[in-house]
Image (cartoon, coloured by chain):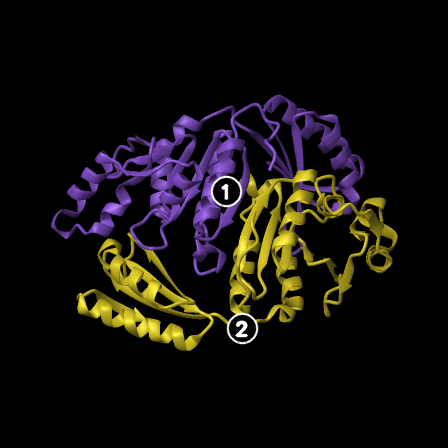
Chain colours: A purple, B yellow
Amino acid sequence: MTAPQETAPTAGMVVIGNEILSGKIVDTNSPYLCRELNFLGIPLLRLYTIPDDFSLIGKTVREFSECFTWVFTSGGIGPTHDDLTIPAIAAGFDVPVVSHTVLEETIRAHYGDRLTEDHLLMARVPEGAELIDTEGLNYPQVIFRNIFILPGVPQLFQFKFNAIKERFRGVPIALREIYLKADEGRVAGCLREVDERFDGVLIGSYPSFFRKDYSLRVTIEGRSAERVDAALSELESLLRNMDAAIVRIA
Amino acid sequence: MTAPQETAPTAGMVVIGNEILSGKIVDTNSPYLCRELNFLGIPLLRLYTIPDDFSLIGKTVREFSECFTWVFTSGGIGPTHDDLTIPAIAAGFDVPVVSHTVLEETIRAHYGDRLTEDHLLMARVPEGAELIDTEGLNYPQVIFRNIFILPGVPQLFQFKFNAIKERFRGVPIALREIYLKADEGRVAGCLREVDERFDGVLIGSYPSFFRKDYSLRVTIEGRSAERVDAALSELESLLRNMDAAIVRIA
């Protein structure tokens, strides 16, 4: 893995869990995070889904931590034998696992008489981890270095990310779209031309073969809304010149 | 990346596309492949989603090719400037990109008078690639070494995988499930005990905090249906001994 060329903040995500890879559970956390980070203007540059494998978790999260501004992990932080994320990350960074006093108190207060030794496993953090208060939620968010260690349960993942997301807000990415009834191979030349001519603007092309309303969705995006609009208008006129059927511009 | 310990066939998947990472398009190909490979008895051990980045695609696919029996890629094989998968894989293996005669003929026949130079980009393969006939589909499947290069469009991805999937059929994975109304931390000890006692059987534990009907789904899986059933029955009796409320066994 090589570090990305971006100078603005970047993100990587590591999804941890056999259940995703075996198709028993569909990962909804990564589509959610992809969308949310994009709204916030943070490019998510890698998304890696790996099994409950102690050394692989540690190695992968450490590599991601070195390559991206922020790393988000999903899954593996409960009280059962397959919850390896915390000790694996600690091992990946050669730091011990410690019980965090605040987490321990939160867990003791939450479970009361029903507390088991296994519940207390959820108080573990890699040494040096900090807590972010997530108001309204009974359990704070653990951050270790630049790694946000999030739960796999989708509702909790979303609640927690939502509680911390403002810290990630960057320059928004402007997105415009052209929906066409056109063959991708016919308009490829126009798309390439505009993609090359407008630095900092990215043109994407996504065919749909089974829709009535359009057959091609073209996206134009970048940090500068002005440049994006200029590229859109250039692309629109190139497409009209070749009689490509524009269904809708959004 | 280190090679997995499995001696049976294994798989890895590389999803290629900015549109997935930016959340513009939800990746439905990987959940589909996860589920299908699991039905076929093939463990998918890694799922990596990466951007349209030429050198990263080549490097990642080559690494996966060395680590897993089969590699599946999704996306980046159309005729536009952001379709880099074929030349990137070729570069990753230090082989030239060539135009495949059969693909070229297929494309010429399909587009007829409407053919453009860009359409012919879809005839490119890494030198040494072969074609698998996918009966009923007008475009065969490209395989290069152990890499199946699949399209990103979900319907095409599924059609094509479906046409080739019988070659991957292995020893099926037996799966049983226990649905409980129980706190994960309370039953963690039972789960750990059975997981440790039954070699080759994997116990998974997936809490749901927002369901009426159950709060914990426990999965028991392995290659030997007998061992899985033995583990299930052991786990069931441990859970009943501690008065955990079993809602359903599936």
The structure residue drawn at horizontal position 63% and vertical position 56%, both measured from the top left corner, is B72
The structure residue drawn at horizontal position 58% and vertical position 32%, both measured from the top left corner, is A175
Q: Quadrant of residue A145?
A: top left
Question: From the image, which quarter does the C terminus of chain B lie in?
Answer: bottom left
Would residue A217 appear left or right of A62 to someone viewing this image? Answer: right
- Residue B171, numbered label: 2
Mark yes or no: residue A44 visible: yes
Label 1 Cα crowd, 10 Å radius (few <14 / some 14-19 / many 20+): some
Q: Quadrant of residue B230?
A: bottom left
Label 1 sits on what residue type? Answer: Thr
Q: Nearer the viewer, residue A49 or A118?
A: A118
Q: Outermost residue toward the bottom?
A: B226
Residue matched to label 1: A60
Label 2 Cα crowd, 10 Å radius (few <14 / some 14-19 / many 20+): some
Q: Is residue A194 above or below residue A138?
A: above
- Is circle 1 on the same chain as circle 2? no
Real-space CA distance between mark 1 and mark 2, rounded to the nearest whole angstrom? 30 Å
Label 2 sits on what residue type? Answer: Val
